[in-house]
Image (tube, grey):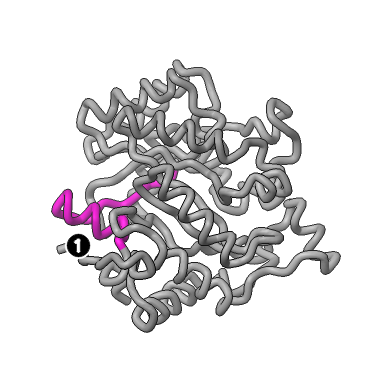
Amino acid sequence: MQLNQHINMFGADLQQRYGEKIHKLTLHGGFSCPNRDGTVGRGGCTFCNVASFSDEAQQHQSIAEQLVRQAKKANRASRYLAYFQAYTSTYAEICLLRDMYQQALSQADIVGICVGTRPDCVSEAVLDLLSGYCQQGYEVWLELGLQSAHDKTLKKINRGHDFACYQTTTIAARQRGIKVCTHLIAGLPGESINDNLATVARVAETGTDGLKLHPLHIVTGSTMAKAWQADRLTALELEEYVQRAGEMIRHTPVDIIYHRISATARRPTLLAPLWCENRWLAMNAIETYLIEMGNQGSALGQSFIPCG
């Protein structure tokens, strides 16, 4: 599989810029979420059961211990990005954030930091903190969960913010030199492939440095799980997702870096679609689709030039 021949992939971009493989090490900072504790809402997003996507045992270890543990799993690299992934990793007092981020960046083999969060949880103080790391020469990515650019959908999934909030945060971050990676979901209730393409267009127009794309997962403990079990909600078939993802990639400007084009989960947490258990199924099928239909940016009339 040679996805980087068809898509501007993060791994290839890092290798070209650093001259070696750079792996992400996922960290759990023990953060909560304002859409779960009542600050913004309760119950979280209707698709969410974060425990299914993160190692809850990690939160009982220090940042340094987690980095050592994760590095042992990434034995093909010697330098890393520290990725604060679980829940809302800017949702804490700035002094706590500074201490936690600095613990990660103080490790000799860490080249930068990725912070996963919500657009409505990025204060001026957080932006100043992350911008300071940029000025010190670190690789800094602010990963913003958007999922859809359509306010009707955001309300339906109980997201707790609108698209304008995402735009404000993205513009402010990029003005400070912070790279933004936008998370999108294909297959949200009521959204067609045209809705997905409109989301890509609006995100690209706002300005983003990276995209993460994955299919809607129906997982235990989520509100959507109840709808799925009652036959009120269906998950995308593999072929549907491949077409949607393929067209979203083809409609993405070539300078935007894809950090991910699919995602996996495991039973018993994963209820549907079960093809998500195999990480390679979607990626191989998307590559085949792009070989036939055209590379990233081709639907915009752009020519993609692979890294290296």
- Of residues 107 and 111, the one nearer the viewer is 111
Rendering coords of residue 71 (x, y %): 33, 49
Give the tally of numbered discs: 1
In which quadrant of the rendered image does the C terminus lie?
bottom left
Relative placement, left or right, of 280 versus 106 is: right
Q: Which element carries disc 1, helix, strand or loop?
A: loop
In which quadrant of the rendered image does the N terminus lie?
bottom left
Residue kind at label 1, given as amino acid type = Cys
Q: Residue at x 66, y 42 (%)?
A: 159
Q: Residue at x 34, y 26 (%)?
A: 102
Relative placement, left or right, of 140 versus 108 is: right
Rendering coords of residue 2 (x, y %): 29, 74
Where is residue 84, by image quadrant? Answer: top left
Q: Is residue 230 magenta?
A: no
Relative placement, left or right, of 251 versus 105 is: right
The stretch of residues the image draws in magenta is 8-26
Residue, far front: 301
User: Pointer 1: residues within 10 angstroms few (<14), some, or many (20+)?
Assistant: some
Residue holding disc 1: 307
Q: Taking the image as drawn, is residue 196 in sight?
A: yes
Q: Residue at x 32, y 36 (%)?
A: 140
- Of residues 117 and 7, the one nearer the viewer is 7
Residue, far right: 230
* Picture layout, residue 282 above or below residue 297: below
Where is residue 125, by image quadrant? Answer: top left
Q: Is residue 15 magenta?
A: yes
Q: Taking the image as drawn, is residue 269 in sight?
A: no
